[in-house]
């Protein structure tokens, strides 16, 4: 069962909606909560303190719910309140010091505080209803009267408590009177402080949301909208449109999901930025932009770049360029796999293909920048091409485990394909 | 991917396809592509939201549902959760622009029989529809890459409990590698000297493992490792 968040009831409440809110949260009958609160009164007035703390720290439901309190429920609540008063008096009679204070002067203070807080709740509600941003006081003269009477109750309660329980000299009395005044003011102004804190939190939240939205809007404007404008102007050149669309798609993807991207800003790992995966992806992007074709790299595993792997990236780039220039198709598959001890790159197209034994003059790029480069670094190149079916270049390069993701790896039972 | 490998008997009538995507433009594009060039695939309906989709699919009982991964109210995974138990015969094929591993693996684990990207051509889309309708799985190269990564035994990889589910056989790994390299089933079969039917069996088995393996919450693990 999904649990409702703890919120004070706005409608159908008896005092502040605390008991109702707790009951909704726990999924029990409100009567039980009230009974427990009254019972806790006996334990040094714990029930009263709990109620006050919940009133202070639990927010009211934000919206009207249309819940009404039945006559039965109201009577039960009244009965419990009477019972609480009786319990208090009994406690006072039995000379339980805390309870007797509560039943006497501190009880008066509590009632005063309740009146003031109640008024604060009401004005909050009015403020929400009106959508106005005026202060806590929005109820006119009646509200002032209520708050004033509450304050009088609080002050009177504290004074009587002090006078009745302490016999002190003049100096101590003056000090205590000051402290008592401060406590009284603190009790009365609790709702104002709370409002201040909550408004501050809310404002900060709003500001963060606003900044976030501005950042996204700025990014979309700089990239997507510009590209769309370009596409509209060049709609008669399908190749150019495709190039723009692919380039924009890639950039947006990188922004959303990339290593330093928007969606992963919190997880940037500087060491990973220079990995084989990123380098190959960047090379593929460059080829895509230059030759207006689709290059879709799939990368499994990663390894920090060293000189050998840099050679692999350059050779792979050359292979992609070759495929883009000569294959005659618009799509190239690139697959990178880093295993323990070896990195593999496959560049494949389904284009015209050629006979590797009869390499024409314009294929010297392959011999020089792919074969020679890979061999210099101790790697191998396997080339497979069938006229009419396409070409696949397979580059493999041994890697040393140090610092890589392939370190300290038990030997796998299988060989690489 | 040629029609010679099509496991569906031609006499069975057109495959009834239902489109779920919150972008009307994309729906009409797919519908136009399928209606125009593909006689054995018929689009019987479309929906733009999760609730609409659930109601319409219940009513129409299509053969294949093309399901967008990203939609408001829970997306494709939510549709799958609501319908999979009561409609086990309806096949779901996930369709997405997203490259995020967690999205892809989430719909696969929720029961989709395959995952393809929205940039796929109309011909390939029709082929993928036929394939899932015939009971096979459809893996894009990227999905194959994700799955290889999730099941890898690199240090730092998720540990495995049940070897039956949590490890790929060598053959399955070979098939996945070739899929990631952009090979079609027929080409894979030629490469590994096995029949296309065997390739299909391997891919289906990988799909089952991806759906059932508990390799430490595959999806979350994949996203934590930034396998995108």
Image (cartoon, coloured by chain):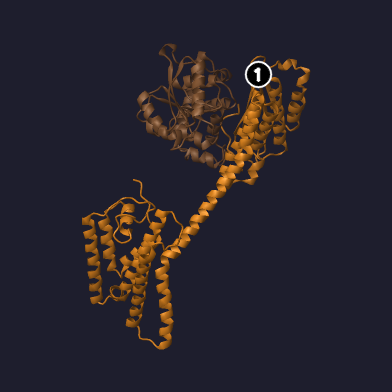
Chain colours: A orange, B brown
> Label 1, on which residue?
A351
Q: Nearer the viewer, residue A236 or A97?
A: A236
Residue A245 seen: yes
Residue B162 seen: no
Q: Position of residue B192 (x, y in %)?
A: 56, 20
* Picture quadrant where residue A283 is located: top right
Chain letter of the residue beneath label 1 in the structure image: A
Name the residue: 49% across, 38% down.
B219
- Against A224, is A65 above or below? below
Name the residue: 41% across, 80% down.
A177
Q: Nearer the viewer, residue B158 or B24?
A: B24
Is A75 on the left-hand or right-hand side of A251?
left
Q: Position of residue B88 (x, y in %)?
A: 37, 26
Is A172 on the left-hand or right-hand side of A335?
left
Q: Nearer the viewer, residue A251 or B104?
A: A251
Name of the residue lying farthest toward the front: A141
Name the residue: 43% across, 78% down.
A179
Q: Position of residue B28 (x, y in %)?
A: 49, 24
* Picture quadrant where residue A306 is located: top right
Name of the residue lying farthest toward the bottom: A169
Quarter that holds the N terminus of chain B: top right
Q: Position of residue A322 (x, y in %)?
A: 71, 24
The secondary element bearing badge 1 is classed as loop
* Picture quadrant where residue A190 is located: bottom left
Name the residue: 35% across, 25% down.
B59
């Amino acid at each position: 069962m999904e649990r409702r968040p703890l919120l004070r009831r706005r409608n159908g409440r008896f005092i502040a909606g605390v008991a109702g809110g707790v009951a909704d949260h726990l999924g029990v009958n409100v009567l039980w909560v009230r009974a427990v609160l009254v019972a806790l009164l006996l334990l040094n007035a714990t029930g009263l303190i709990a109620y006050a703390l919940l009133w202070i720290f639990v927010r009211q439901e934000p919206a009207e719910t249309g819940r009404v309190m039945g006559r039965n429920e109201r009577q039960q609540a009244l009965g419990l309140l009477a019972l609480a008063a009786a319990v208090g008096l009994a406690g006072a009679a039995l000379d339980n010091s805390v309870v007797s204070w509560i039943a006497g002067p501190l009880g008066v203070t509590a009632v005063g505080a309740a009146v003031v807080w109640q008024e604060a709740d009401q004005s909050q509600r009015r403020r929400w209803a009106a959508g106005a941003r005026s202060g806590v006081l929005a109820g006119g003269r009646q509200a002032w009267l209520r708050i004033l009477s509450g304050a009088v109750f609080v002050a009177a309660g504290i004074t009587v408590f002090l006078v009745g329980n302490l016999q002190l000299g003049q100096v101590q009395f003056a000090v205590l009177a000051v402290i008592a005044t401060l406590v009284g003011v603190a009790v009365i102004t609790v709702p104002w402080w709370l409002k201040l804190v909550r408004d501050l939190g809310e404002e900060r939240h709003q500001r963060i949301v606003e900044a976030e939205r501005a950042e996204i809007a700025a990014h979309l404007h700089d990239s997507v909208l510009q590209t769309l404008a370009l596409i509209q102007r060049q709609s008669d050149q399908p190749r150019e449109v495709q190039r723009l669309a692919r380039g924009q798609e890639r950039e947006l993807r990188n922004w959303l999901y990339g290593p330093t991207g928007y969606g992963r800003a919190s997880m940037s790992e500087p060491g990973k930025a220079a990995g084989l995966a990123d380098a190959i992806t960047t090379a593929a992007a460059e080829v895509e932009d230059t030759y207006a074709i689709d290059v879709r790299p799939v990368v499994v595993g990663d390894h920090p770049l060293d000189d050998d792997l840099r050679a692999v990236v350059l050779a792979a780039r050359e292979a992609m360029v070759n495929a883009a220039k000569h294959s005659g198709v618009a799509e190239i598959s690139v697959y990178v796999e880093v295993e323990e001890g070896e990195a593999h790159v496959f560049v494949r197209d389904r284009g015209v293909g050629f006979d590797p034994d009869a390499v024409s003059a314009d294929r010297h790029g392959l011999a020089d920048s792919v074969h020679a480069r890979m061999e210099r670094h101790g790697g191998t190149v396997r080339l497979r091409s069938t006229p009419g079916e396409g070409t696949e270049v397979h580059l493999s390069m041994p890697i040393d485990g140090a610092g890589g993701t392939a370190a300290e790896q038990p030997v796998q039972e299988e060989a690489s394909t | 991917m040629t029609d010679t490998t099509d496991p569906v008997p031609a006499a069975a009538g057109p495959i009834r396809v239902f489109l779920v995507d919150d972008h009307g433009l994309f729906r009409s594009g797919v519908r136009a592509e399928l209606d125009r060039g593909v006689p054995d695939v018929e689009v019987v309906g479309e929906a733009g939201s999760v609730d609409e989709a659930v109601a319409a699919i219940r009513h129409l009982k299509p053969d294949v549902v093309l399901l967008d991964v990203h939609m408001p109210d829970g997306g494709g995974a939510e549709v799958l959760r609501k319908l999979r138990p009561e409609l086990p015969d309806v096949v779901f094929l996930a369709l997405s622009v997203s490259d995020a591993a967690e999205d892809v693996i989430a719909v696969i684990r929720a029961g989709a029989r395959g995952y393809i990207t929205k940039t796929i051509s109309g011909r390939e889309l029709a082929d993928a529809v036929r394939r899932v309708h015939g009971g096979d799985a459809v893996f894009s190269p990227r999905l194959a890459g994700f799955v290889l990564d999730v099941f890898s035994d690199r240090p730092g990889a998720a540990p495995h409990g049940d070897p039956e589910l949590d490890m790929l056989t060598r053959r399955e790994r070979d098939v996945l590698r070739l899929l990631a390299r952009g090979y079609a089933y027929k080409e894979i079969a030629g490469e590994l000297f096995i029949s296309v039917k065997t390739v299909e069996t391997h891919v289906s088995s990988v799909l089952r493992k991806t759906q059932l393996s508990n390799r430490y919450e595959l999806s979350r693990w994949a996203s934590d490792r930034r396998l995108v």
